[in-house]
Amino acid sequence: MPPPVFQDFLNDDAVRKLIPGPYEQHTLTSLSRCFHRVSVVAIILLASWPVAAADLGTYREFTIGASTADVIARTGAAERDMKTLHERPALLQELSWRPRYVIGRTFADRESIAAIVFSFIDNQLFRMAIDYERSRTEGLTKEDMITSLSAMYGPRSTRLAPVAPRSSFDSLDTPTVIATWREGDAMLTLNQSAYGGNFGLVITSMPLEARARKAQATAVTLDAREAPAREAARAKQQADAARAAAEKTRTTNKATFKP
């Protein structure tokens, strides 16, 4: 809570009742000066009280844990824009959004955003990867970016970010982590691309991302294990289709052929 502000001071009549006598005027003046100093200090303390930092799991109007329907509604995307990566053992989906290229809708204060990739596990948003427009960050230093983010999210964390194994969620151009913010289960990292020096943010729910990485690893294992059976089934389906087509052609020609 902010420091208290003293609003209800004693008025002159109340002071006269409490302090009668020949020194009334001197006492009133002293008390008035005292109350003035107290009120000035209170105002200064209130003005200097730090503004509450933004929720680390929130970026603009998007919040970690949101549903796919909520994100689709906020971005103006369509259901068909949602890409399904795996369906088992968990549903892993991804939505790429470029606000500049959304037709029919205007997004205020989005000029700095080039793209956001939203990652979901079982209908829950667990990761936001934000890429900034190069033209909007050109000339800005790492310290400039850290200062800007600290003004929004508070001081950066001094703890090292956990190193997670690479997955398909990561791009081939592995960025360098410049600074990290952590709060509860949420983590935000400021990154800079190794090629071109573009800045970006990654906001994640650490528990949900751990689940997603585990589910992805399991899905890859299952796909590899079942690949021979799937290939055999595909080959059989193609062979059956070819035989059916050949038989249809034979039947048609047999009925119409005249020697």
Image (tube, rainbow, N blue to C red):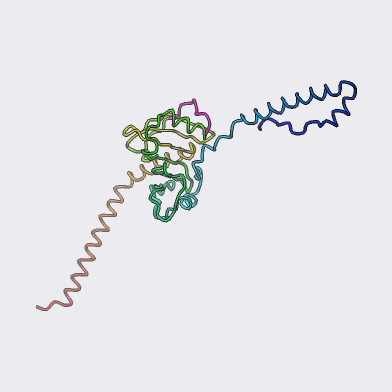
**Percent of width and height locating residue 251:** 20, 73
Query: Is the residue 30 above or below the residue 8 in the image?
Result: above
Which secondary structure dominates the residues rendered in magenta? loop
- Residue at the image position 44 percent from the left and 32 percent from the top: 145
Using the rendered view, name the quadrant where residue 38 is placed: top right
Q: Which residues are magenta?
A: 153-162
Viewport quadrant of the C terminus:
bottom left
Q: Is residue 204 magenta?
A: no
Residue at the farthest left position: 259
Q: Tell me the residue at 33%/35% (across/down).
A: 173
**Residue 40 image offset from top left, x and y in percent:** 69, 27
Image coordinates for residue 39, horizontal then vertical, percent: 71, 28
**Would you place residue 248 above or below residue 258 in this image?**
above
Please say if 176 is above or below 209. Answer: above
Instruction: Give how far across and how far down residue 4 sits, in percent.
Output: 70, 31
Does the magenta run of residues contain 160? Answer: yes
What count of labels does the image hold? 0
Q: Quadrant of the N terminus?
A: top right
Q: Relative to the observer, which residue lies in front, 163 or 182?
A: 182
The residue at 48%/36% (across/down) is: 206
Please state which of residues 92 and 176 is positioned toward the viewer in this rendering: 176
**Residue drawn 51% across and 46% down?**
66
Q: Quadrant of residue 14?
A: top right
